[in-house]
Image: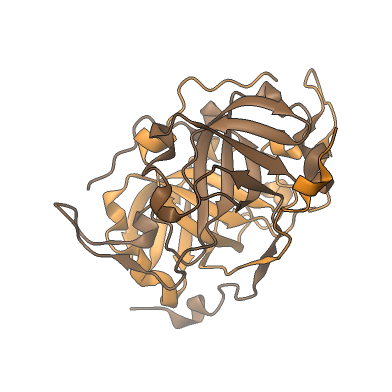
Chain colours: A brown, B orange
């Protein structure tokens, strides 16, 4: 039984997120992008806007970063990915596909160099000009899930 | 030298993110929350709004999920965390602190049970009522960074 009273308590207001920078990959179109950033050895840049550059202080102490970005070419109406090959159909929350209600991309990248608001990184697969919304250090004791499994 | 021409190319439009659900932890205030979700063995719930529940199809095939949530009590003007103990000062992008320009929380959680739009999970440390903005499966071959180090 669905408890509709409970569902009414879910926040409905829109959240305003502001780009803090932009990703420069050199991939002009989605079709140019590699399937997985982790298999993309070429370097990319993240250019952070001047007003947020103080938030990068000592970021070079982290070897790896989570990049949260806004996949601005995505279809936000997507809910289910159809079965393909020997994979079952899955909802987009059971998928890393870019088409999803809030198309926030999440990638772990290696920080190669930091200088004057520009991060040189390896491991991104999105198109040039993709807005960045947050950066966080990868913290192994918080993030590592060696026991994680996926059944597809 | 700062290249101001380049900085002008950073997208400035606001991004509209819509809550897709809500987190039920039972922690009423920030001071009640554990310091780290990974050390919090108690179970929490994520209640997904009816209009997004189809996006959860087959989510139980994943053992672990990334939860992206909106830390609605945060100070978005924060840029630098002062040095404390034997740690150096760090910009908020070199930190997992909730106070940051776009306070998107990122936690890896274990999916314990899924039923009718409600995910039972372990490993969250935020206050009750925190809006959820995205859910993604943890995909070890994309996410694992066994070589990651942090120098603080």
| Residue A142, picture quadrant | top right
Residue A38, image x and y in percent?
42, 34
Residue appearing at x 33%, y 54% in the figure? B113
Q: Residue at the location (77% across, 21% down)? A: B87
The image shows residue B151 at horizontal and vertical percentages of 67, 18
Q: Is residue B121 left or right of residue B80?
A: left
Q: From where the camera sits, is residue B60 visible?
A: yes
Q: Left of B57 or right of it: where is A66?
A: right
Quadrant of the rendering where the N terminus of chain B is positioned = top right
Q: Which one is nearer the viewer's eye here, A75 or A12?
A: A75
For the C terminus of chain B, the quadrant is: top right
Q: Point out the residue furthest to the left here.
A: A86
Residue at position x 64%, y 40% from top? A46
Tell which of A62 and A41 is nearer to you.
A41
Q: Where residue B138 appears, x then y in whole percent?
A: 39, 43
Residue A126 appears at what percent x and percent y? Answer: 49, 48
Total number of numbered discs in the rendering = 0
Let me know if residue B123 appears in the view: no
Depth check, front residue: B77 or A125: A125
**Looking at the rendering, which quadrant does residue B14 occupy?**
bottom right
Q: Nearer the viewer, residue A139 or B145?
A: B145
Q: Is residue A104 above or below residue A40?
A: below
- The vertical placement of A55 against B26, above or below, is above
């Amino acid at each position: 039984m669905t408890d509709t009273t409970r569902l009414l308590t879910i926040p409905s207001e829109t959240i305003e997120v502001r780009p803090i920078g932009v990703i420069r990959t050199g991939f002009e179109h989605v079709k140019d992008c590699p399937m997985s950033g982790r298999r993309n050895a070429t370097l990319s840049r993240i250019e952070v806007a001047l007003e947020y550059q103080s938030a990068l202080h000592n970021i070079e102490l982290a070897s790896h970063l989570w990049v949260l970005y806004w996949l601005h070419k995505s279809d936000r109406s997507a809910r289910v990915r159809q079965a393909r090959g020997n994979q079952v159909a899955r909802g987009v929350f059971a998928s890393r596909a870019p088409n999803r209600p809030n198309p926030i991309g999440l990638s772990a990248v290696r920080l190669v160099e930091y200088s004057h608001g520009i991060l040189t990184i390896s491991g991104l697969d999105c198109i040039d000009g993709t807005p960045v919304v947050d950066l966080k250090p990868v913290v192994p004791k918080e993030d590592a899930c060696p026991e994680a499994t996926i059944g597809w």
